[in-house]
Amino acid sequence: MLNQKQKKLIEDKLLAPFAMKSCESKGRAYPEEEHPYRSCYQRDRDRIIHSAAFRRLEYKTQVFVNHEGDYYRTRLTHTIEVAQIARTIASALRLNVDLTEAIALAHDLGHTPFGHSGEEALNELMAKSGGFNHNVQGLRVVDFLEERYPDFPGLNLSWEVREGIVKHSSAFDKIGRVKGFTSKQMPTLEAQVADIADEIAYDNHDIDDGLTSGLIRESDLEQLKIWNTIDKTILKEHPGIEPARKKYLIIRSLINMQVTDLIRETENRIHELGIRTSLDAKICNKKVVTFSKNMLELRLPLRKFLMARLYNHYRVIRMSIKAKRFIKELFKVYTKNPEQLPVEAQKRIPREGVLRWSQTISPE
């Protein structure tokens, strides 16, 4: 059985010098004894997977809601896809895969139901009480709301995973401002990988769901260079291929193309920026993990297409407006009559108030 000392030797041998090694962690808010054969990031990953908040992601929808069919992504299936892509990238770059996976699995724990529509509604409702940011809420979930252990509140995750949750950023996600996590430093390379894996997963599974739902058509996508190039290659290699199989192959190829480009460009940037340690990556004034200029130019029309033709489709807009109404009505009912809340929530009211925001997590 591998012990901690042996695991450290393996990390030193296999991980890149700029990877975040478990022995270099800033530790936990409540000190714990090391596990005999799991690193701190492995324990974090396992705690996240076994948390109630992680299971609840199954019922939080993205673009489509549950009643529209069981094919479409939920927050849970999206999170699993993000973790898979992030693991692949981290492994290729010789980063800490366990840390990357833990951050990827936790990155959406603070999300509301109904995707970003739910978050927008709560942000409006909480405007006079600090607003709502799902990254900050995610930290609150893992630091306080999960009640599983007798010796401390929350999951007592390592500092690096908690930083990855707060500083998660993408086209749809804004970095949370929380005391103890300075905005003057970039997150670890592992957190940066989780961020961009989130974007890759979003784009490609939204294309899949959009085509399956009929909200977008393949003929619409053919105007995009990135789609058209792969489409022609597949038709040349597999003439007469069934449309459903071709869709799968194109999306698989899109993911592979973006991941490959990302790995190569990140390796170049690590060399050009002189990133030699995990600290070098954090004090760098720009993100190290990114696409090449060419790939960014290919992705931009795709992102614009999805925004115009899918996210702003009248059926999606209609559902978003309905979702916001649900959230606002529930907010009104629960704040007016908090005795309807679960018992564990009612217990927090005397200490935090009905509208609690960041009284337990101070803004930066």
Image (cartoon, rainbow, N blue to C red):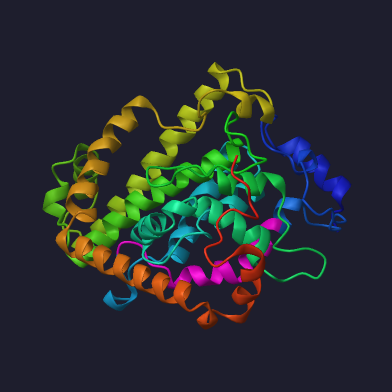
- Taking the image as drawn, is residue 132 in sight? no
Residue 230 colored magenta? Answer: no
Residue 54 colored magenta? Answer: yes
The image position of residue 310, as x and y in percent, is 21, 55
The image position of residue 21, as x and y in percent, is 73, 39
The image position of residue 284, as x and y in percent, is 58, 23
Task: Label the magenta part by its dominant secondary structure.
Answer: helix
Q: Which residue is drawn at 37% across and 40% down?
A: 257
Choose top left, top right, bottom left or bottom right for residue 327: bottom left
**From the image, which quarter does the N terminus lie in?**
bottom right
- Depth check: give the residue in front, 43 or 231: 43
Relative to 344, 149 lies left or right: right
- Taking the image as drawn, is residue 94 in sight? yes
Q: From which residue to which does the magenta span run?
A: 44-63
Give the vertical position of 270 relative to 338 (above or below).
above
The image position of residue 39, as x and y in percent, is 77, 52
Q: Which residue is drawn at 54% across and 82% down?
A: 339
- Depth check: give the residue in front, 178 or 107: 178
